[in-house]
Image (cartoon, rainbow, N blue to C red):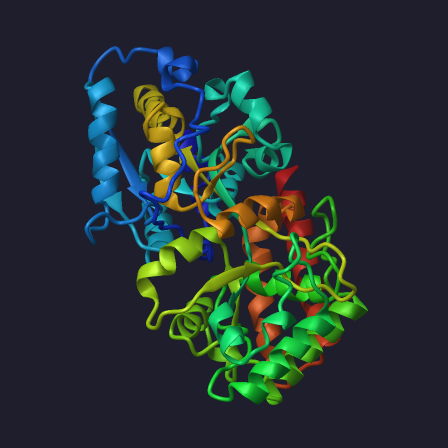
Amino acid sequence: MTVMKKGLMTIVGVALLGMQLTACGNSNTNTNNAPTNKASDTPAATETAAKPVEITWWNFPTFQALDGEVGKYEKEIIAAFNEKNPEIKVNLEMITFEGGPEKLNVAIASNTAPDVIYDAPGRIIDWGKKDLLAPLNDMVTDEVKNDISPAFWKQSSVGDQIYMYPINTAPFMMAVNKTIFEKIGALDLLPLNKEDRTWTFDEYKKALQAVKEKAPEVIPTGFFAKSQAGDQGTRAYIANLGVSRFLNEDNSAVAINTDNAAKALDWIVQATNDKLSVTGAASLAAADVNDLFLQGKLAFTLNYSAVLKAQNVSKKMVEFEDVLLPFPTLDGSEPKLEPYLGGMAVFNNGDENKIAASKKLIDFIANDEVYGKKNLIQTGGLSVRNSITGLYNDPEYTYAEYARKFTTDAPTIADGYADIRTFWFPELQRALIGGATGKEALDSFAKSANEAIAKAKAAAK
């Protein structure tokens, strides 16, 4: 039985992450601090393919579409890659965030998975735990290993096996329509005069009230609970308002069912009733709320990042300035921001030549002296490399780089995470429609999620 087949019967539906990447990035860039690790410097890149090899690359819309054509930029990458590696043919297939996850499940179950993919830890680490991927340790040099935060390597690995080569990142946070606050003369209610932009729950509530009173046509803030997409926005919102963690520090149990977090969820329900937050949140998805924001109908949105800010430039229905903000905290303490992390993985399809070729493609995308930087900019993200900064001449990117100091560990590497997240939105919905108090909903979530963690840990032994 091949390595791929070992995990097939255990594959379950993998939920869509709300971290979508596309980007803008062109003349607004800085030519300094380009990646210093050339593709030819890594162990994997020094191996010469013995014969022509053909690999398949499946890609979500990670890079900004060129000339409105999805996949055009990826084709440019492949053409440049082939100038250095003419013996490797790369077949590109673009997949969507809506249908891509299920298409991947079907492909894995039918032994037709792609050779290489650009994705995020939520799915990649789950595949790694099921022995579906090829380890990438042999292509990680000491220079690269030491230039990337241990927290990112933790998100990219299962034990000591690296299954995702991390490339780009950005902290998830909120965004505000600054233009609205300028129009109502309430800009002083936002923490934009502070370098760290931190603020309290009470300051946030005052800002919402000002929008309700002075711009009644605008919804002060949003919330959503329809599906798993964008779940990092809702869990970070509640966790920061309640100064709590989502999971404990070793990811062995739920930690968000605190009294303060429960009170925060109760407030969200009340804010909906008081018209401070969007109505019908139980039936809204993350994309629905961001669409309201891009239409100028919402003052604050909860699921944002520098990456999404770049992506949304062409999607705005009205002109306004969107500014990044950290989540407010109950006491004004430093927020805890989950990081988006994007990277590449190689499926173990039983062909060593294809695995080696796939690693060469990853190395080129991440580390080529020209395309390494160009690809980062095209995602709209920041580099995971500590030595690579200043990619954009934009104050919001400067703040996003600063806000990396607030980055906390993401729960995506927890045992049973694929199941944990399925219990989150049903409990939020129950609270929103009045079927449970905040504490009842969070306790119920904790019970189900802790059982999933225990089950996953037992199965891993």
Q: Quadrant of residue 387?
A: top right
For the residue pair 150 and 126, the one nearer the viewer reads as 150
How many discs mark residues in the rendered view? 0
Q: Position of residue 209 (x, y in %)?
A: 63, 83
Quadrant of the rendering where the N terminus is positioned: top left
392 vs 202: above or below: above
At x 23% / y 50%, what residue is drawn? 70
70 vs 125: above or below: below
Q: Quadrant of residue 233?
A: bottom right
| Side of 181 where 347 appears, left or right | left
At x 66% / y 57%, what residue is drawn? 194
Does residue 127 appear in the picture of this structure? no
Q: Position of residue 338 (x, y in %)?
A: 60, 51
Does residue 132 appear in the picture of this structure? yes
Q: Quadrant of residue 331?
A: bottom right
At x 69% / y 56%, what residue is drawn? 335
Q: Position of residue 454 (x, y in %)?
A: 69, 50
Q: Position of residue 392 (x, y in %)?
A: 43, 42
420 vs 93: above or below: below
| Side of 46 where 53 appears, left or right | left
Quadrant of the rendering where the C terminus is positioned: top right
At x 45% / y 21%, what residue is drawn? 36
